[in-house]
Amino acid sequence: MREQYADIIVDISQEKLDKPFQYRVPLALRDRLEPGMCVEIPFGNGNRRIKGYVLEVGETCKFDPVRTKELFGIAQKDADVTDRMVALAAWIRQNYGSTMIQALKTVLPARKTVKKQERRFVEVLMNREELRSLLGDCLRKKQHAKARLLEALLQQWEDGAGAIPYQWITGKLNVASGTVNSLVREGAVRIVSTEQFRNPVRLAEEAEGGKRLLSPDQRHIVDSVLEDFDKGQPGTYLIHGITGSGKTEVYMELVAEVLKRGRQAIVLIPEIALTYQTLLRFYRRFGDRVSVMNSTLSAGEKYDQCERAKRGEIDVIIGPRSALFTPFPNIGLIVIDEEHESSYKSESTPKYHARETAMEVARLHGAGVVLGSATPSLESFYRAVRGEYRLFTLRERLTGGRLPTVYTVDLREELKSGNRSIFSLKLQELLADRRDKGQQSMLFLNRRGYAGFVSCRACGEVMKCPHCDVSLSEHRDGRLVCHYCGYSQPKPGLCPKCGSRYLLGFRAGTQQIEEKLQELMPGVRTLRMDGDTTRTKDSYERILSAFANEEADVLIGTQMIVKGHDFPKVTLVGILAADLSLSAADYRAGERTFQLLTQAVGRAGRGAFAGEAVIQTYQPEHYAVTRAAAQDYEGFYQEEILYREMGGYPPVAHMLAVQIFAGEEKAGAELAARLADAVRRAGTAVLGPAAASIGRINDVYRFVFYVKNDDYGRLVQVKDLLEELLIQWKNTTVQVQFDFDPVNCL
Ligand code: ADP
Ligand code: ZN
Ligand code: ZN
């Protein structure tokens, strides 16, 4: 029988020991040790008996077999929460590339003392009829903000919730505190405060609140998932269904069933979709057992929540990516809503993906994973098609509202027919129609601000940021601004290179659209939302709420306007230059374009009136455009997966981006070349290295090379090799990061 060796990380409270030690596995434990198990080992010169965690078991001895010690055995107590978190950290470290400490810091909450924060809630004092009549008054007087608050209060009154957090009112609902005060004066509500952090719900007595009779399609999903679960074979499931098709209802039913079985559930939602309405549905159903994690929580509060989860005081958590690391003792279900969202991939090391990491958490606990999306990621749909995930489809919108009629306009034809406006004739016609009817429109531009550059028409010189390798953009106040680092300078009157006066902006930003729209329809009320208008805190919510209040006829914006918000009065969506994102130089450009277009088109006609959408494009024949216009996900998938197959791109193959960040250009280029060479010599093909598409940001030079392989394990080996070389070469000046199956290119 072959010897076995285990890589073991020593108790994490000793942070300096950030590397595994290898031990021989005793005969009695052969084939019984698994990653994450807690074992006892002889440590140091005195062979002190201490605890450690198994990272990996293999048959090769990395050191001298004679001098390798044998571990004592499995530590007595059962694997507890911390053990599992350590195992998870080890897995993240191994599969995404980071130090063990970085990985542990990702999965374990910072140990901070909780400062008990005072929180305020708004409690209703009136009954339903009184609230209704007050609401009627407000609507008559066109007091929109007050009406919105009353609607929310009525809604939660019906939902049985006791109080609305003050923060929600001034934040997500965007109602000023003066408005709340006027309701206080009228005796409709009062403001209460609690010192403890508790859920603002009084509903615990009615735990089954808010339960609905599921449709047959919904029932089928729930039953299938539970059947596997009860057989002890929970799997991974993908629910493909448009917004409003009842996915959330399915999640809640599954969560309820899992809780009945004494297990806990994690529900991941992109931060932007964490709306009060969604949370209220969960509160209504699960009362005090559910807790929310979002970016407004302090580190102390997060720690507090984790402690409550460990103690079993809560058993459902809702939150973004990091909620995945809630230390529940016995997770039964992980839900990932909007699973295609790129925010599920961490942007800092370790650059883990919440979807794959959820699978590992599920494996450690014996839990099921349910993914949901209207436009599934290629990754998930590919695995579903191959039978690794079970696929369910929900086709009907339960909220009413039909899919909009879509017109695709070829901008080349438009120019030929003499229309030089940025609005096609069709869009002009429909915009005027909406204005006449008093309905709202949205104009979506696939880029931000005056993203266009300023160049000299005489010599071609482009105005660039002196710190970043990108062109400066012209703003209305005449300044030139860098969108990466914020550098700005006045626009020079003459070309700094040749002295010509013809220094002109390439004008195609949201500001220009706003100006042109004003010219086209004098008096039209517009709101603009892009990276510049939303820089200050709360401005994002302020603009959205102004639009919801019908303070404008048209909302003009970049991608942030197409996500997560419902405006029932919007019946027209215009997509200007749909294909700008297609020219981005990375393999996800088609997927991202399809998702954005599908979402944007879906914004129209959510309410009582039918919607229309106009897609303006230079590539009307591109499948990302035609399939989005037809709201045909599967058709899109068929074409896109062919492209991925031919290019050897994920999800068909895997790709590792090795990213190099250096203060000195030469040092960065040299290290990149040496690392790439080492990979080649180890027999794996490399693309690059090259300067990143943005070669410099804030005076840090950026290089990147890519390694593609069918086998993810091979890429992990490449990462291990490079990590080892970096230690050998004692590299400290240049930073190297790994990004597996990158979502965003450098
Ligand atoms: P999704 O998560 O796919 O957007 P939801 O679960 O939010 O869909 O459902 C959309 C709307 O339909 C919600 O208002 C929800 O309350 C309602 N709904 C969902 N399932 C049912 C059902 N079985 N019966 C009645 N209404 C339902
Ligand atoms: Zn010039
Ligand atoms: Zn810059």
Image (cartoon, rainbow, N blue to C red):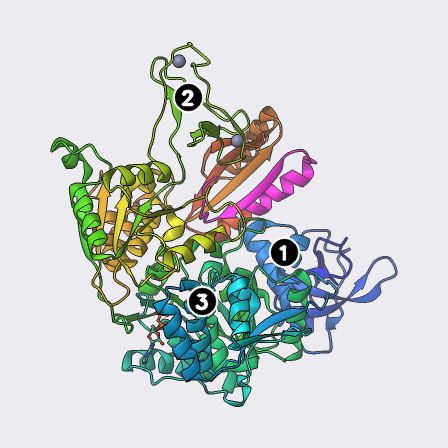
Q: Nearer the viewer, residue 158 or 107?
A: 158
Q: With respect to residue 706, does 16 lie above or below?
A: below
**Circle 1 sits in a helix, a strand or a loop, which is it?**
helix
How far is the residue under mark 2 from the one under mark 3?
A: 50 Å
- Residue at numbered disc 1: 103
How far is the residue under mark 1 from the one under mark 2?
A: 43 Å
Q: Which residues are magenta?
A: 718-746
Residue 465 is left or right of residue 627, and the answer is right
- Residue 520: x %, y % from top left: 23, 39
- Amino acid on which the number 1 mark rests in the picture: Ala
Residue 406 is marked as: none
Q: With respect to residue 17, does 208 lie above or below?
A: below
Indicate which label's residue lies in the foreground, 3 or 1. Answer: 3
- Amino acid on which the number 2 mark rests in the picture: Val
Between discs 2 and 3, the one toward the N terminus: 3
**Circle 3 sits in a helix, a strand or a loop, which is it?**
helix
- Residue at numbered disc 2: 462
- Residue at numbered disc 3: 146
The answer to whether the residue bearing label 3 lies less than 8 angstroms from the nearest atom of ligand 1 is no
Picture residue at 42% right of the left edge, 77% below the top: 155
Q: Quadrant of the N terminus?
A: bottom right
- Residue 187: x %, y % from top left: 53, 77
Q: With respect to residue 498, does 422 lie above or below?
A: below
Q: Quadrant of residue 406?
A: bottom left
